[in-house]
């Protein structure tokens, strides 16, 4: 992906929306965020990981230390599918994207960066964001679509937020997920399997139930942390979908995880007041992940 520069906008918007305590300056905010970034780093060493996203400081730490890194993976996967000879986004004016476990939705910006580069016909995209904590993320998704979107795509992006718990049956989650899915050209699950993978078979079953409800030709992309358990789960989804004749593989799960280099700068204030070099407080240079992409038959 081309170089981009999300962090100054994220910092300014979080400060303006008082995401942190009022009346404090940026150095104080960044210093106070250190412990939350450290806790997130620790949590993401575990599988499943346990993070309480209802805490606004945790969400603020995620926006600073994780969100920018997770814009790029879906762009990488879409670009690889195209390189391998399939156009992953249909050649039409308006597309519809479903994002499960969407949180603040960095993956939407990755899709938009791809639209900007490769899909001149597409001028409108609707993102249905489905998350177990959709309400809590509302202001951060606003930041993504209102402040950041214009820097990634010239088109018009709209979004809707829906509560959907991946651990429940979708007919119990109160959202009409099936209708959203049947309408989608692209369905993305990024960094949410790692939150829920207690029982691998249950997670694989859920992914396949999502895939079954997609319409023919639609693309399913699953991206998650570089744990062996994630690789096995994605591999099982891939095998079961192909064995049942439900879909074809566009991007197989690789034996070794992917590693992409950071393509944005860390602002000096973050280097001075947040990334002070202690354990869990060094800026990451790479994003590591496993990825699978399938097309519905
Ligand atoms: C690590 S964040 C990932 C957010 C975003 N996809 C990204 O890549 O940055 C994990 C997200 O999964 C959501 N989540 C956790 N458990 C969930 C569940 N059982 N059902 C749906 N979403 C869940 C959380 O609310 C959070 O937004
Ligand atoms: Zn649902």
Image (cartoon, helix red, strand yellow):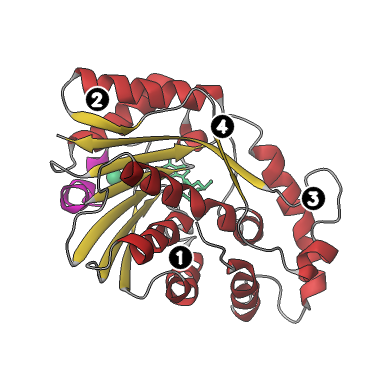
Q: Image quadrant of ligand 2?
A: top left
Quadrant holding the C terminus: top left
Between discs 1 and 3, the one toward the N terminus: 1
Q: Is residue 271 magenta?
A: no
In terms of image quadrants, where is residue 169? top left
Q: Which residue is mark 2?
A: 241
Q: Tell me the distance, in whole angstroms, between the alpha carbons under discs 1 and 2.
A: 31 Å
Query: Label 4 crowding class (10 Å Cα cut-off): few <14, some 14-19, many 20+?
Result: some
Q: Would the CB of label 2 be found within 8 Å of ligand 2?
A: no
Identify the residue shown where x is 66% and y is 77%.
Answer: 15
Give the number of the mark in front: 1 or 2. 2
Up-down relation of residue 228 to residue 171 (above or below):
above
Q: Which residue is mark 4?
A: 226
Between discs 1 and 2, the one toward the N terminus: 1
Between discs 2 and 4, the one toward the N terminus: 4
- Indicate left or right for 292 with 229 as reference: left
Query: Label 3 crowding class (10 Å Cα cut-off): few <14, some 14-19, many 20+?
Result: some
Q: Which residue is mark 1?
A: 141
- Indicate left or right for 42 with 69 as reference: right
Q: Tell me the distance, in whole angstroms, between the alpha carbons under discs 1 and 4.
A: 25 Å
Query: Label 2 crowding class (10 Å Cα cut-off): few <14, some 14-19, many 20+?
Result: many
Q: Which residue is mark 3?
A: 281
Q: Which residues are magenta?
A: 170-184
In terms of image quadrants, where is residue 259? top right
Up-down relation of residue 90 to residue 158 (above or below):
above
The one of 191 and 235 positioned closer to us in this rendering? 235
Q: Is residue 183 magenta?
A: yes
Q: Would the CB of label 3 be found within 8 Å of ligand 1?
A: no
């Amino acid at each position: 992906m081309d170089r981009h520069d999300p962090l100054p906008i994220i910092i300014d918007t979080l400060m303006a929306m008082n995401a942190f305590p009022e009346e404090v300056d940026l150095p104080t905010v960044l210093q106070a965020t250190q412990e939350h970034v450290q806790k997130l780093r620790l949590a993401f060493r575990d599988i499943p990981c346990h993070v309480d996203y209802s805490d606004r400081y945790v969400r603020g730490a995620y926006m600073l230390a994780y969100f920018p890194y997770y814009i790029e993976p879906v762009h990488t996967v879409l670009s690889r599918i195209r390189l391998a000879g399939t156009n992953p986004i249909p050649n039409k004016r308006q597309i519809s994207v479903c994002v499960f476990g969407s949180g603040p939705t960095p993956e939407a910006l990755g899709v938009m960066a791809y639209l900007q580069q490769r899909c001149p016909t597409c001028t409108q995209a609707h993102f249905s964001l489905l998350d177990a904590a959709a309400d809590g993320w509302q202001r951060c998704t606003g930041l993504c679509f209102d402040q950041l979107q214009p820097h990634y795509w010239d088109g018009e992006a709209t979004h809707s937020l829906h509560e959907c718990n991946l651990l429940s049956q979708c007919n119990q989650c109160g959202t009409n997920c099936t209708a959203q899915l049947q309408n989608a050209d692209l369905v993305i699950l990024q960094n949410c399997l790692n939150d829920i993978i207690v029982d691998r078979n249950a997670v694989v079953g859920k992914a396949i139930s999502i895939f079954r409800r997609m319409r023919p030709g639609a693309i399913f992309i699953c991206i998650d942390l570089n744990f062996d358990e994630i690789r096995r789960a994605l591999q099982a989804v891939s095998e079961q979908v192909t064995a049942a004749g439900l879909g074809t593989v566009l991007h197989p799960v690789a034996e070794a995880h992917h590693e992409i280099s950071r393509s944005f700068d860390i602002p000096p204030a973050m280097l001075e007041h947040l990334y002070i070099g202690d354990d869990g407080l060094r800026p990451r240079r790479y994003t590591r992940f496993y990825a699978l992409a399938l097309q519905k038959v």
